Image (cartoon, grey):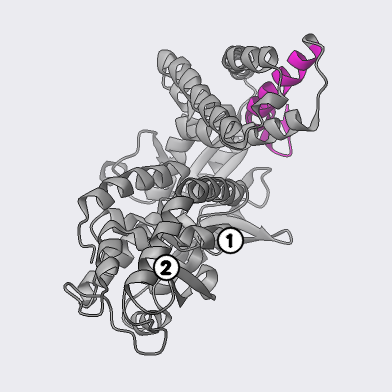
C-alpha cells in the first residue's frame, strides 16, 4: 500500500480536489450534451489555481482530524463560494461568460462542494481502514528539541501520512524535557537495540548540526537495520528567509535564503497582477488623462517621471510616476521628498497626498517588472547607501517590488531620512517575504485603501 514511501492516501490528497472539480465539469457537459470547448479547458485551469490556494489556506484535512466536522463542511462551502465568486468576477470582467452554458455552470457550482465533501469522506474511510489493518509505519525521533516536537505535531495533524510515532530518544533526563507529549524511550545509545527489537521503519534524527560525531556513531549503530533514516537539520538557526528543502538536478539541497514565490505561487501571483492591473487601468484611464493634462498645464516638464529602481534579483528597471516636483532626479545623489518640500508643484502636492502619482506603476505591473503588492522600490542611489548600513536589506529584492506593501500599510510611508526609520521599513518588508500568502496580499490591498484615505505621512 506504499508507493515510493508515500502513502496512497497522501497521493490522493494532492490530486483528489482538482480531479473532482474537473471531473464534475466534464461529466456535466456530457450530461447536458454540451461541446467541451477550449473555453471549458481554460475554466478548468483557472479553477484549479484558485481552488488550490483557497483550500490550502482553509486546511480542511486538519479541521477534520481535530474533530471539527461542522467547521470542515462550512469551510468547504465557504471556500468553494470564494472560488465561484472569483470565477464570476473574471467572467463578467472578460465578457466571456456567454461562452458557457448557463445550465452546466450553475449545476457545476452547486454540485461541486457536495462532490468534494463526498470524496473527502471516502478518503477518510480509506485512512481509517488502513489504520485498523495496521498499515502504518512505525517511527521514532532522536532528539527531543524544537524541530523534533514540530515534526511530532505535523504527524499528528496529518493522519494520511500513516506514521505511528512511538516516542523520543534523548540523552537528557526525561523530567528536564519540556513540550514533549510522547514518552522518552531512552538515551541515544539505546536506539539501535530498540529499532531492531521493535522493527522500527522510520527514524528521524533531530540532533543539532554541531553533534556530527554523535550522528556518525549513531549511523554506524543502525547500519544493520532496515529502518529509513531522515535527518532534520535545524535550518531556522540561521534566521534566514524562506528556509526549505529543494533539489538541483536530483541533488538534495537546503535553501536558507530563497524567494517565497515558486511554482504555482508564482503563476497565481503573476496572473492576479496582470488581471487586476488590466482592469484597474481600464477603469482609471479617464483619471490618468485628466492628471496628465493638469500636470502639463500647471508646470513645465514631462507628465511622467521616470527613475531607475532596483527590482527582482536586484536588477534595475525604470519606474513610472506622475511628475509631482520641479526636478526629475535620477543620479548618484537624490534628495528624498520632505514635508513642505519646496520642489513640489501645486498639483504635485495633491497627487502625493492622494497617492495618485503612483498610478502609472500599473503599467510597470503589466510589463512584469512590478507587482501590485510587494516591497516598495527605492531609488538606486538609496539602495547603494542602505545595503551597506542595514543587514538583510537586499533580501527585499527576492520578489518583485510593489505599488503598495506591508511596510506602507503599517505606517512606514514617506520620508526615511533617519536610519532607524528605514530599518523599520526593511523589517516589515522581510516579514512580508517570510509570511507571504495570497491572503496577505489581499489584506494589504484592502488596508491600502484605508491608508490612502487617511493620507498619513503622504507628502
Tell me the tag on residue 426.
none
In the image, residue 215 sits, relative to residue 343, either above or below, namely above
Work out whether residue 141 or residue 87 is closer to the camera in this orientation and state it. Answer: 87
**Residue that badge 1 annotates:** 368
Tell me the tag on residue 321.
2
Q: Residue furthest top?
A: 31
Work out whether residue 3 or residue 303 is closer to the camera in this orientation and state it. Answer: 303
Label 2 – label 1 distance at C-alpha:
16 Å
The span shown in magenta is 1-30
- Of badges 2 and 1, nearer the viewer stands 2
> At 48% across and 30% down in the image, what residue appears?
59
In the displayed structure image, the side of residue 291 where residue 12 appears, left or right: right
In the image, residue 390 sits, relative to residue 50, either above or below, namely below
Quadrant in the picture for residue 391: bottom left
Indicate the secondary structure of the residue bearing disc 1: loop
Mark 1: few/some/many CA within 10 Å (<14, 14-19, 20+): few
Residue 119 spot, x, y in % from top left:
63, 16
For the residues bearing labels 2 and 1, Cβ distance under 8 angstroms: no
In the displayed structure image, the side of residue 83 where residue 458 appears, left or right: left
Majority SS type along the magenta span: helix
Q: Quadrant of the C terminus?
A: bottom left
> At 57% across and 55% down in the image, what residue appears?
245
Q: Earlier in the sequence, mark 2 or mark 1?
A: 2
Residue 136 spot, x, y in % from top left:
61, 27
Amino acid at each position: 500500500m506504499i508507493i515510493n514511501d508515500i502513502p496512497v492516501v497522501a497521493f490522493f490528497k494532492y490530486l483528489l480536489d482538482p480531479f473532482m472539480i474537473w471531473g464534475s465539469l466534464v461529466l456535466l457537459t456530457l450530461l447536458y450534451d454540451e461541446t467541451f470547448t477550449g473555453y471549458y479547458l481554460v475554466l478548468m485551469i483557472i479553477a484549479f489555481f484558485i481552488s488550490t490556494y483557497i483550500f490550502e489556506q482553509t486546511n480542511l484535512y486538519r479541521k477534520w482530524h481535530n474533530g471539527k466536522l461542522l467547521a470542515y463542511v462550512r469551510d468547504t462551502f465557504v471556500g468553494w463560494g470564494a472560488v465561484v465568486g472569483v470565477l464570476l468576477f473574471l467572467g463578467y470582467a472578460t465578457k466571456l461568460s456567454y461562452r458557457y452554458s448557463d445550465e452546466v455552470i450553475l449545476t457545476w457550482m452547486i454540485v461541486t462542494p457536495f462532490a468534494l465533501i463526498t470524496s473527502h469522506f471516502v478518503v477518510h474511510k480509506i485512512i481509517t481502514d488502513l489504520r485498523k489493518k495496521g498499515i502504518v509505519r512505525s517511527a521514532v525521533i532522536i532528539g527531543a528539541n524544537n524541530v523534533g516536537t514540530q515534526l511530532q505535531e505535523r504527524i499528528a495533524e496529518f493522519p494520511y501520512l500513516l506514521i505511528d510515532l512511538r516516542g523520543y530518544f534523548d540523552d537528557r533526563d526525561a523530567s528536564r524535557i519540556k513540550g514533549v507529549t510522547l514518552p522518552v524511550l531512552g538515551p541515544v545509545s539505546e536506539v539501535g537495540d530498540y529499532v531492531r527489537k521493535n522493527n522500527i521503519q522510520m527514524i528521524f534524527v533531530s540532533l543539532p548540526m554541531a553533534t556530527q560525531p554523535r550522528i556518525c556513531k549513531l549511523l554506524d549503530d543502525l547500519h544493520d537495520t532496515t529502518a529509513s533514516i531522515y535527518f532534520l537539520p535545524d535550518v531556522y538557526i540561521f534566521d534566514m528567509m524562506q528556509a526549505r528543502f529543494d533539489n538541483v538536478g536530483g541533488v538534495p539541497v537546503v535553501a536558507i535564503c530563497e524567494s517565497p514565490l515558486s511554482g504555482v505561487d508564482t503563476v497565481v501571483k503573476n496572473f492576479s497582477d496582470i488581471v487586476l492591473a488590466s482592469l484597474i487601468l481600464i477603469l482609471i484611464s479617464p483619471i490618468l488623462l485628466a492628471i496628465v493634462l493638469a500636470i502639463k498645464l500647471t508646470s513645465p516638464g514631462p507628465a511622467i517621471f521616470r527613475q531607475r529602481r532596483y527590482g527582482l534579483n536586484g536588477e534595475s528597471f525604470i519606474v513610472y510616476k506622475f511628475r509631482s516636483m520641479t526636478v526629475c532626479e535620477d543620479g548618484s545623489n537624490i534628495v528624498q521628498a520632505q514635508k513642505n518640500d519646496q520642489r513640489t508643484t501645486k498639483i504635485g502636492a495633491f497627487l502625493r497626498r492622494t497617492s495618485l502619482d503612483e498610478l502609472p506603476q500599473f503599467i510597470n505591473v503589466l510589463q512584469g517588472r512590478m507587482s501590485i503588492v510587494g516591497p516598495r522600490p527605492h531609488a538606486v542611489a538609496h539602495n547603494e547607501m542602505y545595503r551597506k548600513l542595514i543587514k538583510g536589506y537586499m533580501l527585499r529584492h527576492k520578489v518583485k517590488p510593489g505599488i503598495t506593501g506591508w511596510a506602507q500599510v503599517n505606517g512606514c510611508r514617506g520620508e526615511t531620512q533617519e536610519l532607524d526609520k528605514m530599518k523599520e521599513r526593511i523589517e516589515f518588508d522581510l516579514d512580508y517575504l517570510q509570511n507571504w500568502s495570497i491572503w496577505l496580499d489581499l489584506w494589504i490591498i484592502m488596508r491600502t485603501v484605508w491608508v490612502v484615505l487617511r493620507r498619513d505621512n503622504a507628502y
